[in-house]
Image (cartoon, coloured by chain):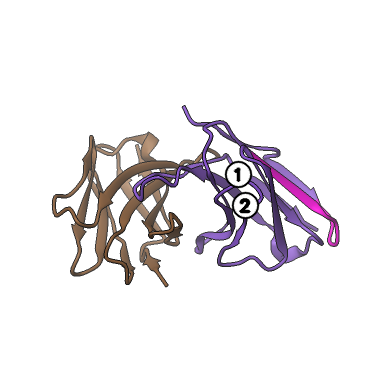
Amino acid sequence: AQTVTQSQPEMSVQEAETVTLSCTYDTSESDYYLFWYKQPPSRQMILVIRQEAYKQQNATENRFSVNFQKAAKSFSLKISDSQLGDAAMYFCVINNAGNMLTFGGGTRLMVKP
Amino acid sequence: DVKVTQSSRYLVKRTGEKVFLECVQDMDHENMFWYRQDPGLGLRLIYFSYDVKMKEKGDIPEGYSVSREKKERFSLILESASTNQTSMYLCASSSPRQLQETQYFGPGTRLLVL
């Protein structure tokens, strides 16, 4: 069984500053993908960034980047230059061989103007 | 753009009622999923389907059933709604071709069972 743990139920960040959301996971699979999904208030869940487990290089998408530590089974999300539109629930997710997703409990990010 | 739609955004039902939640996707995806979302628990998989008329149990199938008669449509059925089924229900779809394929989510249905 796979598990994903997000230890920070809520985080806040000042607009234009940087924030890091933490995630740890456990899996027995050797081939998997990790994702961060974003769920804005009253809006649809969307993919933010994905990381292939066999790639050492950390994924980056504009202001979003990850710190993937495979041995430690850690997958944190860094948001640089935070914007008001970044306020959302963020989910750390692992995808197993069956294309099934396992979600963490989520971190609610608040952005202060 | 992939579009996943759900039949209702908000629903209020009484205990014991039969409830149908419908999901439609327009990307010809083989895989479709039903999740429920509860605070602090993230999303938990109820059922999924990888083809028409096929279904597989997820992590929490008890009290639910599903139907997939057409590729684009996946229905979640609560045979006899109970108050502990009050939750947000999310539908998703994906292509099974590659492991990294993202799932595309609908807007969710917030169900209140009284």
Q: Label 1: how many residues lie within 10 Å, few (<14), some (14-19) or many (20+)?
A: many
Q: Quadrant of residue A21?
A: bottom left
In the image, is A30 to the left or to the right of B10?
Answer: left
Q: Which residues are magenta?
A: B13-23
Magenta highlight on residue B94: no
Q: Is residue B18 magenta?
A: yes
Q: Is residue B35 visible?
A: no
The Cα–Cα distance between marks 2 and 1, rounded to whole angstroms, is 6 Å
Q: Is residue B56 above or below residue A88?
A: below
Residue visible at 27% across and 65% down in the picture? A30
- Contact between marks 2 and 1 (CB within 8 A): the answer is yes
**Residue A53 spot, x, y in % from top left:** 24, 57
Badge number at residue B88: 2
Q: Residue at x 79, y 52 (%)?
A: B19
Looking at the picture, which amino acid does disc 2 mark? Met
Badges 2 and 1, same chain: yes
Q: Colour of chain A?
A: brown
Q: Is residue A94 visible?
A: yes
Q: Amino acid at mark 1?
A: Gly
Q: Which residue is mark 1?
A: B108
The chain that appears purple in the image is B
Q: Helix, strand, or loop for circle 2?
A: strand
